[in-house]
Amino acid sequence: MSTATDTTTTTAGSVDSLETVRLVNGLSCELPANSPLAKLLHSQRTWVGPDAKQRLRILNAAKSVAIVGASPNPARSSYFVGTYLQQSSDYRLYFVNPNATEILGQPAYASLQDLPEVPDIVVVFRRGSDIPGVVDEVVASGAKTIWVQLGIWNQDAAYYGEEQGLTVVMDRCIKVEHARFHGGLHLLGFDTGQITARKTIR
């Protein structure tokens, strides 16, 4: 993760902290933390996660999924994703929310450590700033894959997770990804509008 590593004195006599910034080519360099170049590089995405074939392998290999940040509120995206996975996949599904007792008819667990098994995939619905802490929880639980939902981005946390030995998927919806690989999306990639991806037998 990018952290301040040193200090340097500028020609004007002020002291700027140096930090390691990752470049697009995978290399890194030290720049003054407040420099325009450092800010520009921070705004660019340099981390690249698994490609489509790799994501398909992750989904096909998994037998169990835990949703951290699952909500009992039908208006929340985590509820919709949980409903889809419950109806359209064969995963053993677990909901993690310390403030809930039941979600979608299943017990809600206070933490990953409370689950009856180690999940193959941990899906995360939390703020981007919370992701480093969730990475630590995933590592402590023994899970191997963290899947951070669409719209949530923390590049440093992605690098950190990989450094901890995790497979990291970020800023992608597991519902959309599962549906596109299992018949729940049209050929052009548009959602069918149905929660279930199972085909009706006529």
Image: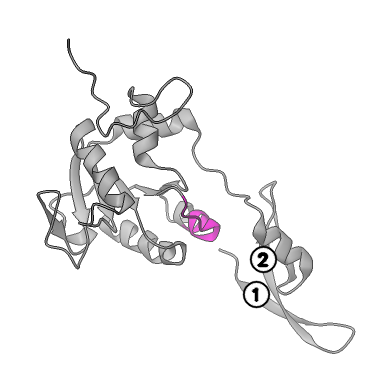
The one nearer the camera, 191 or 57, is: 191
Instruction: Residue at 34%, 38% (x, y): give it.
Output: 175
Region of the chain picked out in magenta, as a range: 151-160
Relative vertical location of residue 129 with respect to residue 57 in this rendering, above or below: below
Answer whether residue 63 is magenta in the image.
no
Residue behind mark 1: 5
Residue 81 or residue 91, whichever sits in front = 81
Query: Is mark 1 in CB contact (under 8 Å) with mark 2?
Result: yes
Residue 167 in the image: above or below residue 157: above
Label 2 element class: strand
**Which quadrant is the C terminus positioned in?**
top left
Residue at the far bottom in the pictured view:
13
The quarter of the picture where residue 182 lies is top left
Give how far across and how far down residue 61 sits, in percent: 30, 32
- Residue 33 lies, in percent from the top left, at 70, 73
- Callout 2 amino acid: Thr
Viewer-proximal residue, 178 or 201?
201
Residue drawn at (50%, 55%) of the image: 153
Q: Residues within 10 Å of mark 2 (few under 14, many from 20)?
A: some
- The answer to which of marks 1 and 2 sits earlier in the sequence is 1
Q: Which residue is mark 2?
A: 20
